[in-house]
Image (cartoon, rainbow, N blue to C red):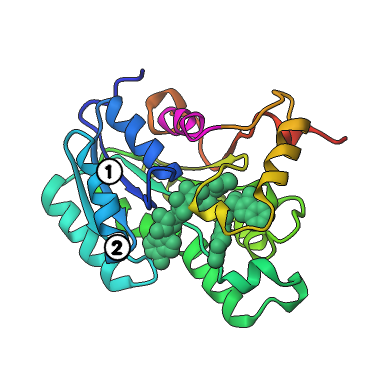
Amino acid sequence: MLNLEGRVAVVFGVANKRSIAYAIAQKLAESGCTLAVGYQNDRLKAESESLIAGLPSAWSFPCDVTSDAEIERSFAELKSRYGTIHILVHSIAFAPAPEIHNDFVETSREGFRIAHDISVYSLIALARAAAPLMTGGGSIMTMTYYGSEKVFPNYNVMGVAKAALEATVRYLAVSLGRRNIRVNAISAGPIKTLAARGIGDLGAMLRGHAERAPLGRNVEQAEVAGAAVYLASDLSSGVTGEVTYVDAGYNVMGF
Ligand code: NAD
Ligand code: 0WE
């Protein structure tokens, strides 16, 4: 395991034990990071706080990323607690349920707005709030999906939002690069989490993915977390603006 002792990591997107963000928080903690974990709201407070309590030296706080005031309050508190932070993990996505279930052409203006506000704009808002605390450089990462590049039935407006998220990673990499803040995305294969459970036939999706992927299987949260620790560490010091695939190789296949 890499040694990240003395680094402060702020992780957004822990909802339950299946969350990709929770696997990342666990591996960062195992690597020696001090952790601060943001959860969406009081509905998730009990669950996320009990998970986070199991990690050494972790603190948790509520932060709904649709609110500028909550983001501002969260980072003011982070500044007073830690002074400097080194790692920011953004593992947040949402589109209103009808947008995932209806035909893409039926995408509503409000559904499009919400999906892009929560799944894309929030990365810009969090990066802007975090950058002044990353005085010794930093590593920012977000989670994306191959539905940004190719069409997956029902992924719909989330695919459009993930394309915008990946472009946002590139623009932020340039915007923050001279401050030695790196910005990258991890493109994970399908994993059975809360966000994936809302979809139609997840079982068929997972079977099809495992069948076609070079490794002949699906990926686990812990494998995504492994790439996250690499991106958080100095091993990736020359890497920014990139998308790293943790998908058992699925994206290289043509047929
Ligand atoms: P998850 O449901 O555990 O995580 C999604 C998180 O987004 C939750 O913690 C939720 O509370 C948070 N969130 C939603 N709206 C929010 C808001 N307004 N403010 C603050 N937080 C908010 O599911 P997950 O699969 O771990 O998803 C995490 C990320 O990984 C997402 O970006 C998702 O698109 C991405 N991803 C998931 C898969 C997959 O198959 N599970 C594959 C590739 C990428
Ligand atoms: O990014 C995601 C999930 C994103 C997501 C899922 C939901 C379902 C419940 C965002 N918003 C909502 N809103 C809801 O109301 N993934 C990569 C997982 C996922 O979602 C899919 C997938 C995969 C994989 C949707 C359709 C097809 C495949």
- 183 in magenta: no
Q: Is residue 236 left or right of residue 233?
A: right
Q: Earlier in the sequence, mark 2 or mark 1?
A: 1
Q: Nearer the viewer, residue 241 or 101?
A: 101
Quadrant of the drawing holding the N terminus:
top left
Query: Label 1 CB, ligand 1: below 8 Å?
Result: no
Query: Label 2 CB, ligand 1: below 8 Å?
Result: yes
Q: Is residue 247 left or right of residue 226?
A: right
The answer for how far apart the CA atoms under marks 2 and 1 are is 17 Å
Which amino acid type is marked by label 1? Leu
Horizontal and vertical percent for residue 61? 22, 56
| Residue at the spot of label 1 | 51
Q: Nearer the viewer, residue 27 or 34?
A: 27
Work out whether 83 lies above or below 121.
above
Quadrant of the drawing holding the C terminus:
top right
Horizontal and vertical percent for residue 214? 74, 25
Q: Is label 2 in a helix, a strand or a loop? A: loop
Rendered residue at 50%/58% (across/down): 93
Over which residues does the magenta segment extend?
220-230
